[in-house]
Image: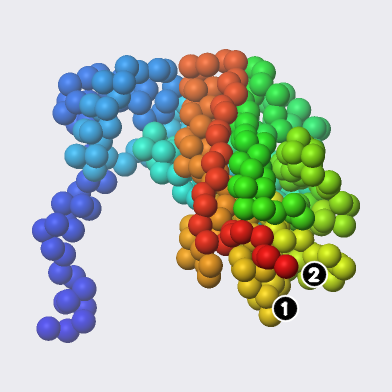
Amino acid sequence: MDSAARFAIVTEAERRSLSHTHVNIREVAKKAGVSTATVSRVVNATVPVGAVTERRVRSAIKALGYYPNTHARTLGSGKSHMYGLIISDISNPFFPDIAKCFERIAVEHGQELLIANTDYQPQRMQLCVRRMLERKVDGVAIMTSEMDPHLIRLLNKRGIPIVFLDTGRVGPYISNIFIDYSNGIEKAIEHLVGLGHKKIAFVSGPATLASANIRSEAFELSLKKRGLKSAASYRKSGDHRIEGGQSAMEELLKLRQPPTAVIASNDLTAIGIIRAIHAAGLKVPGDISVIGFDDIEISKFLQPPLTTIRVPRAEIGVSAFTALYAASSKRAAHGTEYRISTELVVRESTGPVKAK
């Protein structure tokens, strides 16, 4: 058999799969036991449909392999059926985790996802927002602290639902996801003090990020509450990347009295801190204890496994989608504030202060 003949063969399974592209909305309606208008409402999310009915329609869509014409949907409904997700750093596992969860739920609800990355640069926000407007997204999740009030007003003026991470004020079609950073920092300080540490340093993220500043302020307040001094030399600025954490730790190691413990503003920073400690011939936690923030997947596989403050990314993704879906489908005109709790995950990068 020649190659042309081989490629001409189509299995029965493939034939059935290909035939699904010809399934029309009437067949879906018949199988689900509803009207074509109801199917259209579920597919286009134009009018709220009861949960039971929606599940029945989506089950029929899945069973028949129905693929709606997205171009026709956009023209017919005036909606793009696409949400925008703006993040700070696609290379930081924290953000892909959010995107993965958001995208999974979006697909389940017939929505697509457009992702834009600011790379922690406020000036890139304008480019990101422009992309969202050009694609006529039905809502935007701004999971970053790089803010431009003018651009936010522009989105709001266009009637595009928005959900922020930490920095928004709830209002018409505007929701906010509030992460309880303070509780996480409080637990981290409590843990270190319990191990006998008093010389505790903090490596923050970029000063331009609201979330980084919130964590820094929480660190200061927690130390003050316990009557511990917060020396300026023990506070360093990082960039939420490994290199920034390493550079900051190298500076801390040059001090006449280096800290016995360091808290990082995120896990990537903590990885850089551990790298600098090891490069100096010191041990974690034997010489210096380290605590991260976020609990990205790799943190538990480090040597030693990283003690860190867990931020549930899946919950953030679900909350962001829920806020946009409610607003864009007209189920909730006024925004909502979603509160996300944090918790300390103790592993092996923290231990008792080294005896002199």
Question: Which one is in front, 323 or 138?
Answer: 323
Residue 305, percent from left and from top: 51, 63
Question: Which one is in front, 189 or 328?
Answer: 189
Q: Residue at x 19, y 26 (%)?
A: 32
Q: Residue at x 21, y 78 (%)?
A: 4
Residue kind at label 1, given as amino acid type: Ala
Question: Which one is in front, 106 or 177?
Answer: 177
Question: Which one is in front, 271 or 202?
Answer: 202
- Give the quadrant of the N terminus: bottom left
Q: CA distance from mark 1 to mark 2?
A: 8 Å
Q: Residue at x 46, y 49 (%)?
A: 100
Write down the quadrant of residue 262 in the picture. Answer: bottom right
Would you say residue 97 is visible in this rendering? yes
- 243, above or below 261, in the image: below
Q: Which colour scheme appears in the figure?
A: rainbow
- 64, above or below 261, in the image: above
Residue 231, percent from left and from top: 87, 51
Q: Secondary structure at mark 2?
A: helix
C-beta proximity under 8 Å, tags 1 and 2: yes
Dot 2 crowding, Cα within 10 Å, few <14, some 14–19, many 20+: some
Residue kind at label 2, given as amino acid type: Leu
